């Protein structure tokens, strides 16, 4: 089923028209990013592989598309009050970057131990950074309290149609550059990027499959998709872009309806994929930015001979993460790939749809459903 206009708890689900409008909004500020092919990745995966270089964005991540789309449309009252966001880094950088462009005060709540590269960037962009709580969701709770008490415009990282429509412009660029693609693989944290990809792919009616990838160590969005209800779970991944304990309603509703498949990848696979992306594309990617390659490696046999786009969603790796990745080295991901195309009992990534997967709660699941 392809929706035209739907409402999720009072919020309108973005459509292709919103994505086209977002593109018009962001065009003065952002260039389309490159979509490059790498024969070495083709060999690794046995497919025709295209990498969407969102790591080349001015903040080093795709989120900036959504930030500019949203902040450019704040009304006078919201601009005067200032904006606030909670972030593990890239959403905060996006809001900081856009707020600077449009002369708006920005406050970002980050968890303790947040990636210092991202925190420094937010500060350099003029945002006020509040370090709050041990993880993203703790920072989010603090952020929501501050928004309520101080009257700031709260910019949620997932439940914002303008963010989703904004990040969806990346998928629009992909399908315009390569209308013949079979599959696009998107990393998932809160799900805005994957939801945007689904909106574009399904509205165009192209036979373009959208597959999400999340860390098995932080599977809330995956489990929510599989169960068709919002659940929380553990959050233990080192890929902070994928690190959420809970799932968000707006992106989830879009994913429930339109995402073709979803795979979980282990920390080791994300580390290896990060190494491989750096080695084979000579690009810096952060762990979340390599998750699409980790997912594709897991789905190798299913992708054989297909034309596949991997979204390199971000390049903001910290020096400490980079050292860890390089020290761990590559395993032979090509040969090690494809353990039955499954991330856990119940068959995530099997292509069998969520019905077969709903019971799987993931290792160490806390299941705060
Ligand atoms: C580099 C990177 N990739 C992927 C994601 C996941 O995006 P989403 O929360 O839209 O699912 C994020 C989120 O911050 C990110 O920073």
Image (spheres, rainbow, N blue to C red):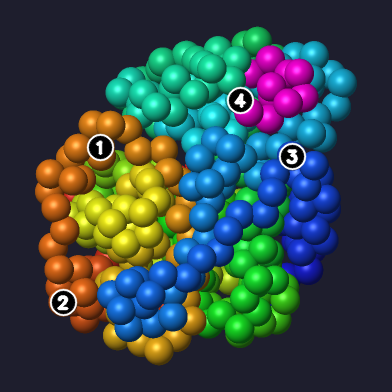
- Residue at figure coordinates x 72%, y 76% from the top left: 204
Q: In this figure, which residue is indicated by the disc labeled 3?
A: 29
Residue extent of the magenta highlight: 97-106
- The residue identified by callout 2 is 335
Q: Earlier in the sequence, mark 2 or mark 4?
A: 4
Image position, residue 100 (x, y; %): 69, 22
355 horizontally vs 107: left or right: left
Q: Disc 3 versus disc 1: distance between alpha carbons?
A: 30 Å
Q: Nearer the viewer, mark 2 or mark 4?
A: 2
Image quadrant in which you'd find residue 292: bottom left
The first of marks 1 and 2 along the sequence is 1
Is 311 situated above or below 317? below
Q: CA distance from mark 3 to mark 4?
A: 14 Å
The local secondary structure at tag 3 comes to: loop
> Up-down: is 79 above or below 353?
above
Choose mark 3 or mark 4, whichever is in front: 3
Mark 1, residue position: 321
Image point (53%, 46%), residue name: 56
Mark 4 residue element: helix
List x then y, in percent, for residue 349. Answer: 34, 74
């Amino acid at each position: 089923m392809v929706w035209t206009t739907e409402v999720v708890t009072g919020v309108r689900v973005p459509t292709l028209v919103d994505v086209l409008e977002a593109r018009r909004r962001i065009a003065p500020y952002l260039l389309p990013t490159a979509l490059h092919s790498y024969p070495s990745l083709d060999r690794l995966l046995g497919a025709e592989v295209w990498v969407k270089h969102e790591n080349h964005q001015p903040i080093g991540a795709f989120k900036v598309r959504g930030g500019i789309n949203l902040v450019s449309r704040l009304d006078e009252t919201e601009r005067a009050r200032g904006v606030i966001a909670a972030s593990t880094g890239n959403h905060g950088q996006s809001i900081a970057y856009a707020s600077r462009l449009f002369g708006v005060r920005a406050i970002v709540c980050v968890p303790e131990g947040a990636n210092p590269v991202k925190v420094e960037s937010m500060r350099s962009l003029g945002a006020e950074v509040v370090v709050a709580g041990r993880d993203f969701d703790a920072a989010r709770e603090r952020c929501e309290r501050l928004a309520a008490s101080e009257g700031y415009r709260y910019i949620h990282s997932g439940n914002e149609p303008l963010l989703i429509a904004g990040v969806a412009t990346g998928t629009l660029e992909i399908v315009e550059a390569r209308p013949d693609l079979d599959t696009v693989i998107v990393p998932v944290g809160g799900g805005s990027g994957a939801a945007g990809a689904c909106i574009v792919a399904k509205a165009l009616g192209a036979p373009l499959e959208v597959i999400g990838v999340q860390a098995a160590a932080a599977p809330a969005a995956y489990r929510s998709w599989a169960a068709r209800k919002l659940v929380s779970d553990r959050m233990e991944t080192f890929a902070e872009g994928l690190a959420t304990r809970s799932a968000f309603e707006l992106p989830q509703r879009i994913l429930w309806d339109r995402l073709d498949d979803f795979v979980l990848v282990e920390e080791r696979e994300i580390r290896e994929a990060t190494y491989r992306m750096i080695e084979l594309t000579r690009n810096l990617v952060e762990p979340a930015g390599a998750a699409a390659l980790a997912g594709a490696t897991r789905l190798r046999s299913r992708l054989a001979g297909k034309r596949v786009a991997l979204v390199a969603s971000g390049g903001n790796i910290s020096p400490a993460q980079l050292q860890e990745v390089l020290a761990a080295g590559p395993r032979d991901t090509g040969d090690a790939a494809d353990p039955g195309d499954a991330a856990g009992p119940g068959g995530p990534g099997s292509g069998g749809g969520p019905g077969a997967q709903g019971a799987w709660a993931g290792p160490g699941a806390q299941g705060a459903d």
